[in-house]
Amino acid sequence: MILHNYDLFENCYRVRLVASCAEVALELINVDAFPGTEEKSPEYLKLNPMGRLPILEDNALVLRNLSAVLIYVAEQDIDKRFIPDEAKDRARMMDWLGFACDDLAVAVQARAVALLDAAGDVAELRAQARALFRILDDHLTRQSLRGENFVAGDVPSLADLALFPAFALSRDFNLDHDEFPALRLWARRIRLLPGFITMPGIPDYH
Amino acid sequence: MTQTVEVLSQWVPIALSNMIESGTSAGVVAKGAEIVVWRDSSGVAHAWEDRCPHRGMKMSFGFVRGDHITCLYHGWEYDQSGTCQYIPAHPEVEVPKSICVARYGVAEAGGLIWAQLPLGSSESSFAGLPAMEGVKSVYIDASDATVLAVLRKQGCADGDVANVVILERDGATMTIGIQPISSAQCALHITVPEGCAGDVRESILDWSEELRRSIEELEVVT
Ligand code: FES
């Protein structure tokens, strides 16, 4: 399985993080995305006409949608740790996976504007990301009241792994962690998962 | 008789006790002061100026290792007294005892961590409070005066110490620590008596989210 990767892109890190925690081997092909914009070169546009990373290739299969990529990687886990079996549990997980991949795209964009010269209004994007972090913090407070330590249950799921990078990287676009105590505790639990890896911008405390 | 000029000091709640686990740190702002609150591996809470003596970076970005907190930037390590013990770039050098982080008076009572403001206040012990359990810290984009006025309309009473109010709701007695952050922001640290039922706590969460929403809508209009 090949991941067309750029180390500083949050969405590429999400795939690497899931693969590492799920013990799935990925072959990385590093793309000169910044400042080279290689993902928009004619060769790469053939793989993904949207001109975006990550792209996952498994023989003839080419995936470009973030949640499709994450699900496919997590499915390769021989222990199937991160995708619940039961329909209701899986649906709960998918609900937050959608939040991570769709709604939180504003946080990815805020960071891209702040660090990687992308176009956009960083103050507006930051405000939107903050509102979403509040929703997540409120949700995690309820979860722990119900005895559940993770977003979609009492065990970590794909949704938790997909959500973690946006929070962990938010200081890159000047959104601090002060206001989100429940998110801080949850992020610490994610850090303790076997296979957890960091990326530039996420300090490794060891 | 010596005469000293006493700085008017006060104790301000800066976090719920259960939100600062052993071995973790967090940045907080109280009345404009940037503070790092951290708990060492033996469970003792500390509140220091959020500023590393080396180059002034935030200590709250760092991490706790045993009884020390380490700055993220160049790894300077400080013990519980705030004294620098180790400089990774110069491991052979004995660190001068004068390299210290400024510390706030800190107390833990009523399910809350308290800091004594301002920095350099003469140490005074904090009045004891009954044991309570933290439910949630709610951060609101409005001044503490605005939020307090709304809570008074809902019937809250002053607590036994400053920066605390008591509010009865849905059969629960909440004790709420108020942390003024800036003229545009404050935090409410909501606690309930130990053994308070789960459904009551859930209704408190509903109430707190609604409170935040209604106050912030009001702030936008005015
Ligand atoms: S700024 Fe803290 S070690 Fe350099």
Image (spheres, coloured by chain):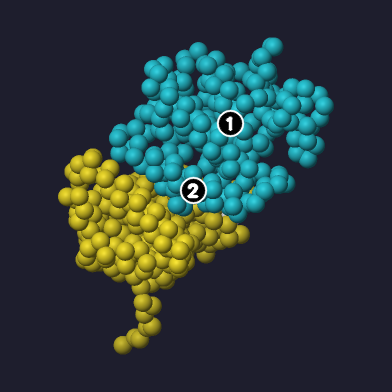
Chain colours: A cyan, B yellow
* Marked residue chain, label 2: A
Mark 1 Cα-neighbour bin, 10 Å: few <14, some 14–19, many ≥20: many
B8 and A156: which one is in front? A156
Seen at 58% across and 43% down, the residue is A107
Left or right of B75 on screen, residue A147: left
| Crowdedness near tag 2: few (<14), some (14–19) or many (≥20) residues, C-alpha within 10 Å | few
What is the secondary structure assignment of the residue under circle 1? helix
Q: Position of residue B42 (x, y in %)?
A: 35, 46
* Quadrant of the rendering where the N terminus of chain A is positioned: top right
Residue highlighted by disc 2: A131
Residue at 62% x, 36% y is: A10
Distance from Cα at disc 2 to Cα at disc 1: 21 Å
In this figure, which residue is indicated by the disc labeled 1? A14
* Residue A149 falls in image quadrant: top left
The residue closer to the viewer here, A89 or B76, is A89
Mark sitting earlier along the chain (2/1) = 1
Number of callouts: 2
User: In this orientation, does residue A41 appear?
Assistant: yes
Which quadrant holds residue B213? bottom left
Q: Are marks 2 and 1 on the same chain?
A: yes
Please tell me which residue lies in front, B120 or A151: A151
| Label 2 element class | helix
Of residues A37 and A17, the one nearer the viewer is A37
Query: The disc labelled 2 sits on which kind of residue?
Result: Ala
Direction left: furthest residue? B171
Compared with B204, B47 (above or below) is below
Rendered location of residue B40, percent (x, y) = 39, 48
Say which residue appears at 22% left-offset and 44% top-offset.
B200
* The image quadrant in which ligand 1 is located: bottom right
